[in-house]
Amino acid sequence: MGGLVFALILLVVVGVVTGGERFVSFGNLITVLSLAAVIGVVSIGMTFVITSGGIDLSVGSVLGLASVWASTLSTQYMAEDYGWWVIVVTALAVGLVAGLVNGALVAYGRVPAFIATLAMLTAARGLAEIIAGRRTQIVDVEPFFDVFQARPLGLPTIVWIFVVVAAAGWFLLNRTTFGRRTVAVGGNPEASRLAGIKIKRHTLYLYGLSGLAAGIGGAMILARTTAGSSTNGLFYELDAIAAVVVGGTLLAGGRGTITGTVLGVLIFSTLTNVFVINNIDSSVQAIAKGAIIVAAVLVQQWFASRERTTST
């Protein structure tokens, strides 16, 4: 964890040196946090799935589908009649259902997680395109923006949502039976089954949780962009996996850290911001992200080999 904090501080120092007042301004801080908020919420859900030894490639597409479904004219008309919360509930419901479908395929259909969520990735994106007619749907419900574009204590509402979701995720993973079971399933599924953990049902819940996080992200991106689009959340699954892995959660399962995931998200959002401020080509950004991910996995493997050597 100390290494992640050091890396984040180093990036901030680089930003201050190269970007000067533009980087340290309060407006830029808000930009970094807003950029981190949506992908951060998605990454919290991804942390649980990866900790259990699974993977969810569909979160970006599910987020896009949730944003499209929640921004249809029929949903907006209902929101005007019954309240802005209809948009939020719709986004959350879409995400939860998609996640549960993933979980059912993996747990009860015995479909490998990679294949099941890859299928959802393509299906959700295609359904979003059909619903939106390949057009961007503008949200025009003022009460929704009154709530989600407010700035309590100077920070955007979506940043506070990220804080709340991260805190709830930390508590769920570290202080509840559900979290302990998640770690156990990822560490040794057979031993967990023999200990009485219902593996299939728990797996269903985990993918449902990941889908719910994507649904929350769908509502957040509507607040940030004011529009639902089938392209929302494009490649978010890769960013989420990267943040989780860099944060210290084992890809093989058995160990997860919400704090590490939050730091990983902040590292990537700060890195992106530094590149943008210095007008560095997006291709270089992609190379840098790839190098960081590979380095993180190599470090994980090194520590794992040391632990095996020590135990023997």
Image (spheres, rainbow, N blue to C red):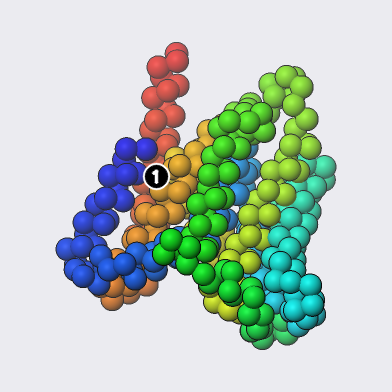
Residue 271 occupies quadrant: bottom left
* Residue shown at 21% from the left, 56% from the top: 13
Q: Residue furthest top?
A: 312
Task: Return the x and y of residue 207 as percentages of the image width and height.
Answer: 70, 48
Residue annotated with mark 1: 296
Image-based side of 26 in relation to 229, left or right: left
Q: Residue at x 58, y 44 (%)?
A: 168
Tell me: 237 left or right of 289. Answer: right
Q: Nearer the viewer, residue 110 or 167?
A: 167
Residue furthest out toward the front: 153
Residue visible at 50% across and 42% down? 258
Seen at 63% across and 66% down, the residue is 218
> Against 92, is 203 above or below?
above
Image height of 40 relative to 141, above or below: above
- Residue 177's image quarter? top right
The answer to whether any part of residue 285 appears in the image is no
Question: Where residue 300 sits: x, y (%)?
Answer: 42, 37
- Image quadrant containing the C terminus: top left
Across and down, in percent, residue 80 comes to 75, 79
In the figure, 109 relative to 276: above or below? above
Residue situated in front as seen by the camera: 50 or 257: 257
Task: Tell me: 310 left or right of 234.
Answer: left
What is the crowding at mark 1: few (fewer than 14 residues within 10 Å), some, or many (at least 20)?
some
Res. 11 image quadrant: bottom left
Say which element carries label 1. helix
Residue flagged by tag 1: what amino acid is it? Ala
